Image (tube, helix red, strand yellow):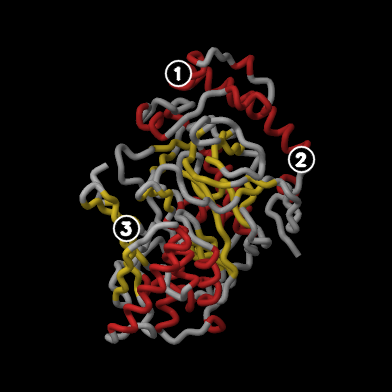
Amino acid sequence: MERYYQPEIETASREQIKAWQDERLVKQVRHVWDNVPYYRKKMQDAGLTPGDIQSSDDLRKLPFLSKADLRDAYPYGLVGVPLKDCVRIQSTSGTTGKRVVAFYTQEDIDLWETCCARAIVAAGGTNEDVCQVSYGYGLFTGGPGLNGGSHKVGCLTVPTSSGNTERQIMFIRDLNATILCCTPSYAAYLGESMREMGLTPEQIPLKAGIFGAEAWSEEMRQSIQDTLGIKAYDIYGLTELSGPGVAFECSAQSGMHINEDHFIAEVIDPDTGEVLPDGQQGELVFTAITKKAFPLIRYRTRDICVLSREKCPCGRTHVKMTKPRGRTDDMLIIRGVNVFPSQIETVLLNLGYPANYQILVGRVNNTDTLEVRVEMTPEMFTDNLGEINARQKQLVDGLRSMLGLTAKVTLVAPKSITRSEGKAVRVIDNRKI
């Protein structure tokens, strides 16, 4: 039987959801106009006043915000309340330019944790579960968000943070952890480590995992589920909007329900900014309609996805988004071809390789080069050059079929690619572009 954390909200009628969005958007636009000069100027430059926004149907009139705006307004330019009313900041894990710093009132934190609680309950969590939160804590939103959500559900919460794999496994086994929250690449590593210890899925107490913060494929999901003996659920969020819990998967595992009482989602053509109908692929744009300290309107996420309002067997009525199918900003363009790391991962997993690989992009004589370094499993590892060459050719052919271009493939020894305890570093782009 499907469980809900807030059934009256999660299964509300489409009419009720739209009524909430209409009322909250109008209030939020007025709040931003009155309290965020940076965005008020963007509205004025577009010839708009709060009176022009009467309902969510008017959302497309409003100007976009981008990561460039967040950097320009850093640190306080987009804060919507007096600093004395802010109780916390969180920050992105990005490595380029200035970090995004997001602000929270206590109410903002409560609403964020409620969204995470909905995700935990959708994954089968109750107050009888032991929830091990192995996302990073501190500035990164993963740990604090799921930690708070776990408390709201009433789970026994184990705040291990990331890293120290030996201790992670000890707590999973000794405390009989039933729900694991971490990045999918770390979940795969934990599963690999437990398998090397001789543990079978039946000997691992986990029943569910909530994995996000990086792209992962359906093939990787299946691999994690098989190794750990769990059901693996996706979760989506951005520090800019609060953190994980903006959207989450239900038992159907066919897309993530967006918490539409707090966030309005649009999909746009990334080149023109035109709003696209449901079912068409484009860039995801979010408007936070309840967040007060850092109230972003029409924020361009750069994530590529599709929205669907088809009826979900779980009974939830909130719109679903697909797993991001890449990003408009870290999509690789190699010799004129759009390449997403997730496409490469799909090929590797389909051919039986672990999801531990690196993509190296370079440029020789003004021509892009693409190399994929792929770890072999211990069972594959051999010093037979003929066998290695045959395997590499199989991967080259598979990647050419998927990408439409030829990549160099280098098979490397098991465990020779550095393991990630946070977001996996998949791409090394050495081009000077």
What is the quadrant of residue 151 in the picture?
bottom right
Q: Are marks 3 and 1 in contact (CB under 8 Å)?
A: no
Q: Amino acid at mark 2?
A: Arg
Quadrant (top left, top right, bottom left, bottom right) of the N terminus = bottom right
Q: Where residue 282 sits in the image (x, y, percent)?
A: 55, 41
Please tell me whether mark 3 or mark 1 is closer to you in this view: 3
Task: Work out whether residue 417 or residue 361 is closer to the camera in this orientation and state it.
Answer: 361
Residue 14: mark in rendering = 2
Tell me the SS state at disc 3. Answer: strand
Q: Position of residue 121 (x, y in %)?
A: 64, 59
Mark 3, residue position: 370
In this rendering, the answer to whether 386 lies above or below 370 is: below
| Dot 1 or dot 2, earlier in sequence | 2
What's the residue type where badge 1 is placed? Pro
Residue placed most toward the observer, 171 or 18: 18
- What residue appears at the point 46 percent right and 16 percent down from the top-left corner? 41
Q: Tell me residue 344's x, y (percent).
A: 43, 61
Label for residue 37? 1
Residue at horizontal 62%, vertical 27%? 59
Mark 1 vs mark 2, foreground winner is 2
Quarter the C terminus occupies: top left
Q: From mark 3 to mark 1, how far is it between C-alphas?
A: 45 Å
Tell me where residue 380 appears, x and y as whole percent: 37, 83
